[in-house]
Amino acid sequence: MKILVLCDDKWHPAEVVEKGMAFLTEEGFELDFVKDAKDILTPEMLRRYPLIVNAKGNVLNCGNDAPWFDNGVTEVGPKELKSYVEQGGGFLSIHSGNSFTADECREYTEFVGNSFVTHPARCEVTVHVEREHPVTEGVSDFTIRDEHYQLDHLAEDILPLLTTRSETGGNQMGGYVRMVGKGRLCVLAPGHILSVWENPEFRKLIRNAIRWCTDGQA
């Protein structure tokens, strides 16, 4: 399966995502990484992939914090991503893919189903499985050191799967799924540092989310 991975921003270098997802290539997945999404992505390009993974905030790349989405310039913005999923594509938003605020990019936050509020300093975070679901199949609760994201403006149609807990951040939404038209969308909030991506339980979540997001595609 070919997967398009969007990554690299000022606070989340691509190297973490590239190394963190490398295990998937050993399992037969073909990963295409795009860093400067503004000048590469087109709607036609999206249709080549059954799944898009977004681990990128709203900036060009790690060396340029100009906005990724720019009306009249960007070929693929929130409307095009939403259309891709509505037509049957899969979308997996990991960590910095959930770092958009409603003030800066409401179209994207409404599409993905959340807006970013804040996070405390990197700390010990426990990821708790809230319900049985194909995305959480075989996954046990686990503890990591990570940025503990606080998300708000959660879409009414999400199905919560994970809760994240820390002493400084309390209880937060850690992951969910939702249907968007004919397609499927999954959100995983953890993932700031490489050790999180290397955690065996987090890897299970990624594998399961990939399968669920693309299940039923022709």
Image (cartoon, rainbow, N blue to C red):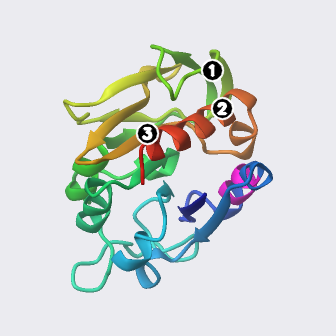
| Front in this rendered view, residue 165 or 182 | 182
Is residue 162 something that shows in the picture?
yes
What amino acid is at disc 3? Val
Q: Which residue is mark 1?
A: 139
Spot occupied by residue 136 in the image (x, y as percentages of width and height):
54, 23
Quick one: label 3 or label 1, which is nearer the N terminus? 1
Most extreme residue toward the front, as rendered?
218
Where disc 3 sits, the SS reads: strand
Vertically, is 211 above or below 156?
Answer: below
**Is-magenta flag for residue 19?**
yes
Taking the spot 74% from the left edge, 33% from the top edge, the residue there is 199
What amino acid is at disc 1? Val
Where disc 1 sits, the SS reads: loop
Taking the spot 61% from the left edge, 68% from the top edge, the residue there is 33
Taking the spot 45% from the left edge, 13% from the top edge, the residue there is 131
Vertically, is 34 above or below 127?
Answer: below
Question: Where is residue 115, by image quadrant?
Answer: top left
What is the chief secondary structure element of the magenta stretch?
Answer: helix
Contact flag, marks 2 and 3 (Cβ < 8 Å): no
Vertically, is 93 above or below 208?
Answer: below
Judge left or right: residue 16 versus residue 102.
right
Q: Which residue is mark 2?
A: 204
Quick one: label 2 or label 1, which is nearer the N terminus? 1
C-alpha distance separating marks 2 and 3 = 14 Å
C-alpha distance separating marks 3 and 1 = 16 Å
